[in-house]
Amino acid sequence: MTTEKKWADLSPEERREERFQRWLSPLGVPFSSSEAEKNYKARVTRFIKAIKLEGGTLKTVMYDYEELKRSWLKFLNDFEMDSFIGPGLVLPGKMLEMIDYKIQVWPGHGLADDIPSYQYIEGEYMRPHEYDALIKDPADYLLRTFLPRSVGAFEGFRKLGPLTPFIGIPVFYITQFSDPEIRASVQALLDAAEEGAKWQAAVMEVGLEFLKAGLPSIWGAFCGAPYDLVGDMLRGTRGIMTDMYKRPDKLHEAMERVASIVIDEAIGGATASGCPIIFMPLHKGTGGFMSNEQFESFYWPTLKKVMMGLINEGLVPMPYAGDMVF
């Protein structure tokens, strides 16, 4: 300990530095060799550098794409890694504001500026009686019903006719876009797309720099369990848990319908990226959400279907059950 000050007189930052030094040079440890001691110090130094990565916040990199690139590339230069995860899940805050995204709040938009994660705002964005519409035509249902409820910029699309008309003559479908509310939604999406393109360019630049440095991405695409997708986004936790009792057949049918879509999207993402690993964050299948019997009936069958669909395409599922903080 420093002789200039007693422990009680040290600031929190000084105390932390003192503890770092003790950690870096442990007293009384008989290292087996000088090489072992060297490796120990190098590993602890990496930990300390990671802990000291201060000054930036999630809000900062959500709104400042240059800072997003700087932060990720600094990490590339400061640490010896075997692989990398790009900033593709650090969503563009300005774009989310432009489209009036309702399913999440984030630092600076519903949360304090220094909060290090997003927060879901669950709701029954799909009503119980709408299972049939989802099952019949998922794309049409999502465009005309789900998105207008969950994303303000899509509000005008509630006035659109069916996305898949019986007769494939485009004139009548296109004419709908003369409606002022539909036009306003289209313009809002075009404006947001420009912002999204700036963010995407930054994300892709970071990924390319990591690849050029010889670091492979740890996953090529991500997907999830059909039960989670219905529960997280459409019905909410309370809604889907109720559905297990009140409308189990419709829930099963919807999850089967969603499973094939999930597989196709993951295959497309992995093909584009070149990495065969599919990251699968799992949310609602733990014991706190359902019994073992419910897991076997509602969660596992379609999760297994997705995983086998990926495996059959030569892809490598990487399920993850736990908390995620970005």
Image: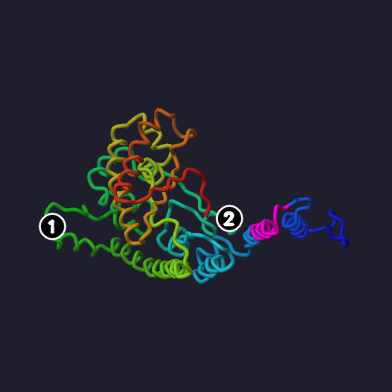
Q: Using the image as rendered, state which of residue 47 and residue 26 is in the foreground.
A: 26
Is 33 contained in the magenta span? Answer: yes
Q: Amino acid at mark 1?
A: Gly
Residue at position x 29%, y 47% in the image: 312
Going from N to C along the chain, the mark reached first, 2 or 1, is 2
Residue at position x 15%, y 60% in the image: 172
> In the image, which residues are magenta?
31-44
Q: Amino acid at mark 2?
A: Ile
Q: Using the image as rendered, state which of residue 134 and residue 201 is in the foreground.
A: 201
* Residue 48 image point, x, y percent: 66, 59
* SS at mark 2 in the image: loop
Apparent side of residue 81 relative to residue 124 in the rendered image (left or right): right
Is 263 contained in the magenta span? Answer: no
How has the structure been colored for display?
rainbow
* Residue 182 image point, x, y percent: 28, 61
Residue at position x 51%, y 60% in the image: 82
* Residue 130 image point, x, y percent: 29, 41
The image's mark for residue 168 is 1
Q: Dot 2 corresponds to which residue?
A: 115
Chief secondary structure of the magenta portion: helix
Apparent side of residue 1 relative to residue 43 in the rendered image (left or right): right
